Image (cartoon, rainbow, N blue to C red):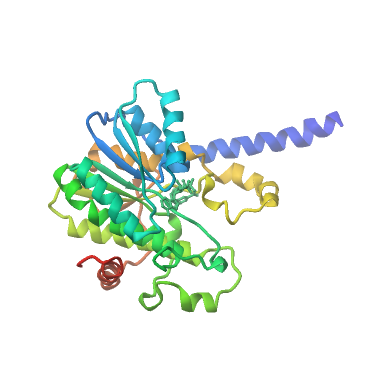
C-alpha cells in the first residue's frame, strides 16, 4: 500500500501539479499597477466570476465602481466582500440592469446618465451559456445568447457612448471568448430558429460561440465608428476559467469526471480576470483600438472578418434594439 502511494499516486500528483504550474506560466498576469483614482468604471455582471475579480482589483486601484448587475442583493454581497478585504477602496454602487430586457436597459442607462455624465471605463462582462435545447429567449423574444451577450451590451454601450466620450481618453472592454473562432453568423437566422431545427448533439454550443463572434464584430465596428473620439475599444478572451458560467450545463458527475481536466486547464476567476484588468488599465493601450487580446497581449484571431457582415450586423442590431444606425 505504502509503495503504491510512493511510486504511483505521489508521482502522478506531482506531475499534475507541475503541468498546472507550467500552464500557469503561459497565462499572463497584468503587471501594470496604474492607479484609477478619480475614474468611474461600470462593470456588467460584477457580482461573480471574472467580473467580480475585475471589480476587486479595480477597487484596489481606487476606482469608483458601478456594479451593473441583474440582482441587487448579489451585487451588494459582492461589494461587501470586497470592502472586507480592501480597507481603503473608494465608492462602489450597485445598480440593477437586466441585459435580457431592452426597456430595463434603457431605464438603467437613463439613471446612469443622470448620475454619471462621464464614464471612464465600461466593461461589458456579463454573459450566459445555456443549453440551446432549453429554447430560452429574452423578454423581447431574442435567442438568449444573442439577446444577452450581444444585443443587451450593444444597446447599453450605444446609450452610454456620450458618457464615454465626455471622459476621453476612455475605453470599452468587451469580454468575448476564443470560442468566437468557432462561431457562425447567419444574418437570416440571428435567433437560431433554423439552426435549432437541425441541431445535432455536440459538446459545442453554437449559440454561445455565435454571440462571442458577435462581440468580436461589435468591438471592431465600434472601434471604427469611435475613431478620433478618444474612446478605445478592446475585445478580450479571458481564457477557460472556473466560474459559474457553465452551471446550467454541468452535472454533478462532470465534477468528478472532469476534475483532472479542470485542474490542468481551467484558470481561477482571478487568473481569468487578468486580461480584462489589463485592457481596462494598461497605459500603453491608449489610442490602440479595435484589437483582440488574450493573455495580456494582442491576439490574432483565426476569423477572416468580413466587413460587409460587420456593418450589416451593426445595422440589424440597431434596428432590433430600436436605435438609429
Ligand atoms: N468562464 C469561462 O471559461 C469564460 C471563457 C471565455 C469567456 N468568458 C466570458 O466571461 C464573461 C464572464 O463570465 P464568467 O465566466 O465570470 O461567468 P459568471 O460567473 O456566470 O458571470 C456571469 C455574470 O453575468 C451576469 N448575467 C447573466 N445574465 C445577465 C443578464 N440578463 N443581465 C445582467 N447580468 C447578467 C451574471 O449574473 P448572475 O450572477 O445574476 O447570474 C454574472 O454576474 C462572460 O461574458 C463569458 O462569456 C468566460
Residue shown at the point (23%, 55%) measured from the top left: 159
User: Looking at the rendering, in which quadrant would you find the C terminus?
Assistant: bottom left
Q: Is residue 27 visible?
A: no
Q: Is residue 197 visible?
A: yes
Q: Nearer the viewer, residue 236 or 207?
A: 207
Residue shown at the point (29%, 32%) measured from the top left: 63
- Left or right of 290? Residue 240 is right
Considering only vertical position in the picture, is 217 above or below 75?
Answer: below
Q: What count of labels does the image hold?
A: 0
- Left or right of 21? Residue 120 is left
Q: Where is residue 71? Give x, y as percent.
A: 44, 45
Q: Nearer the viewer, residue 171 or 324?
A: 324
Q: Where is residue 274? Give x, y as percent.
A: 40, 39
Q: Nearer the viewer, residue 115 or 196?
A: 115
User: Looking at the rendering, in which quadrant would you find the N terminus?
Assistant: top right
Q: Where is residue 317? Give x, y as percent.
A: 30, 67
Residue 154 found in image quarter: bottom left
- Residue positioned most to the right: 1
Amino acid at each position: 500500500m505504502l509503495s503504491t502511494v510512493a511510486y504511483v499516486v505521489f508521482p502522478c500528483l506531482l506531475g499534475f501539479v507541475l503541468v498546472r504550474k507550467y500552464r500557469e506560466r503561459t497565462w499572463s498576469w497584468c503587471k501594470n499597477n496604474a492607479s484609477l483614482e478619480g475614474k468611474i468604471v461600470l462593470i456588467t455582471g460584477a457580482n461573480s466570476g471574472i467580473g467580480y475579480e475585475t471589480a476587486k482589483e479595480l477597487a484596489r486601484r481606487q476606482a469608483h465602481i458601478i456594479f451593473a448587475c441583474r440582482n441587487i442583493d448579489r451585487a451588494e454581497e459582492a461589494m461587501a466582500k470586497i470592502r472586507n478585504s480592501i480597507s481603503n477602496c473608494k465608492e462602489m454602487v450597485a445598480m440593477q440592469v437586466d441585459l435580457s430586457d431592452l426597456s430595463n436597459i434603457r431605464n438603467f442607462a437613463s439613471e446612469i446618465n443622470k448620475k454619471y455624465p462621464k464614464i471612464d471605463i465600461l466593461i461589458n462582462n456579463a454573459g450566459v451559456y445555456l443549453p440551446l435545447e432549453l429554447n430560452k429567449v429574452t423578454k423581447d423574444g431574442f435567442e438568449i445568447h444573442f439577446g444577452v451577450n450581444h444585443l443587451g451590451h450593444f444597446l447599453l454601450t450605444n446609450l452610454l457612448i456620450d458618457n464615454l466620450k465626455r471622459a476621453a481618453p476612455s475605453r470599452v472592454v468587451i469580454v468575448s471568448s476564443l470560442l468566437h473562432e468557432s462561431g457562425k453568423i447567419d444574418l437570416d437566422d440571428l435567433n437560431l430558429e433554423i439552426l435549432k431545427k437541425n441541431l445535432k448533439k455536440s459538446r459545442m454550443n453554437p449559440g454561445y460561440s455565435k454571440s462571442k463572434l458577435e462581440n468580436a464584430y461589435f468591438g471592431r465596428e465600434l472601434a471604427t465608428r469611435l475613431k478620433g473620439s478618444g474612446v478605445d475599444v478592446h475585445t478580450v478572451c479571458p481564457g477557460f476559467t472556473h466560474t459559474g458560467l457553465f452551471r446550467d450545463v454541468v452535472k454533478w458527475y462532470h465534477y468528478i469526471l472532469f476534475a483532472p481536466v479542470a485542474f490542468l486547464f481551467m484558470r481561477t476567476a482571478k487568473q481569468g480576470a487578468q486580461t480584462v484588468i489589463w485592457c481596462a488599465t494598461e497605459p500603453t493601450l491608449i489610442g490602440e483600438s479595435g484589437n483582440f487580446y488574450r493573455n495580456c497581449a494582442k491576439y490574432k484571431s483565426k476569423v477572416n472578418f468580413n466587413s460587409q457582415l460587420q456593418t450589416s450586423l451593426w445595422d440589424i442590431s440597431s434596428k432590433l434594439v430600436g436605435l438609429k444606425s
